[in-house]
């Protein structure tokens, strides 16, 4: 396991680890988070093992921007709202991203995802059950420079969740994380940004229905 500071140079190291199926602990605009490629089933499964998390509790995903979100999810307005300017869902996402908002959206079907992703991601984004819940997916564009730069460089969706054992408080202090998880065989890199400012977890908003529903 490596422990590195959140510098521009170390973004490349984190990207290489993630692309090779590794798990990275990374600071975010809320708390420290576990990261793994959403397309890598073995890597995502490592996070469940680390957290002792039930497989029924799916993971949200960090995306680089709205464009990547549209590659994974249906983002438009409800039928009843068509013809009234900008799509309702898109307008909401633009007003809250980047930031501390996770939005539940309907997952695009596999064929649509393959048609819309760039040629550099040949074959489309493979989305596994561990990040899908009932045909929906939870997406967020964070607002933390190192993480946003990492997302820009890797250009792939990242499965993510707070650093903790399930049902325990989310962690914000790197020294406590190193103490608890520093010897884990499932973690390849810890990005040590010291103690993060106290912050609540991201708000979770369901946009799959006509009525907007706040889940958390």
Image: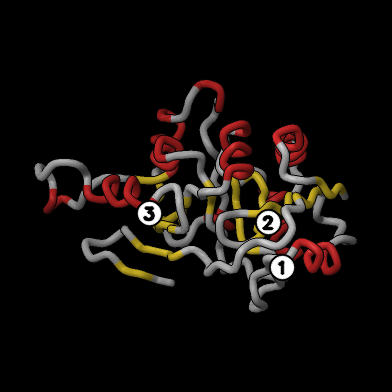
In the image, residue 91 sits, relative to residue 170, either above or below, namely: above
- Mark toward the viewer: 1 or 2: 2
The CA span between labels 1 and 3 is 25 Å
Label 1: state its secondary structure: helix
Identify residue for label 1.
51
Q: Which of the two labelled residues, at mark 1 and mark 3, occupies the earlier sequence position?
A: 1
Q: Residues within 10 Å of mark 3 (few under 14, many from 20)?
A: many
Label 3: state its secondary structure: strand
Q: In what quadrant of the picture does the C terminus appear?
A: bottom left
Residue 7 appears at what percent x and percent y? 72, 39
The disc label shown at residue 34, or none: 2
Say left or right for 130 vs 136.
Answer: right
In the image, residue 21 sits, relative to residue 163, either above or below, namely: above
Residue drawn 68% across and 68% down? 171
Residue 162 appears at what percent x and percent y? 63, 63
Residue drawn 84% across and 49% down? 3
Q: Marks 1 and 2: CB-CB under 8 Å?
A: yes
Q: Residues within 10 Å of mark 1 (few under 14, many from 20)?
A: some
Identify residue for label 3.
105
Q: Quadrant of residue 204?
A: bottom left
């Amino acid at each position: 396991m490596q422990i590195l500071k959140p510098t521009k140079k170390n973004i490349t190291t984190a990207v290489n680890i993630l692309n090779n199926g590794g798990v990275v602990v990374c600071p975010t605009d809320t708390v420290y988070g576990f990261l793994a490629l959403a397309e890598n089933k073995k890597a995502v499964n490592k996070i469940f093992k680390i957290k002792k998390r039930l497989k029924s509790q799916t993971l949200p995903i960090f995306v680089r921007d709205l464009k990547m979100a549209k590659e994974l999810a249906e983002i438009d307005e409800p039928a009843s709202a068509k013809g009234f300017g900008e799509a309702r869902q898109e307008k909401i996402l633009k007003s809250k991203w980047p930031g501390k908002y996770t939005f539940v959206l309907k997952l695009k079907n596999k064929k649509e995802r393959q048609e819309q992703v760039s040629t550099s991601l040949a074959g489309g984004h493979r989305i596994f059950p561990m990040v899908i819940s009932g045909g929906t997916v939870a997406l967020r564009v964070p607002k933390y420079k190192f993480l946003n730069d990492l997302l820009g460089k890797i250009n792939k969706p990242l499965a993510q969740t707070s650093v903790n054992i399930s049902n325990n408080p989310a962690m914000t202090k790197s020294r406590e994380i190193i103490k608890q998880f520093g010897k884990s065989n499932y973690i390849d890199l810890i990005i040590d940004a010291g103690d993060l400012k106290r912050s609540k977890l991201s708000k979770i908003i369901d946009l799959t229905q006509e009525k907007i529903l706040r889940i958390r």
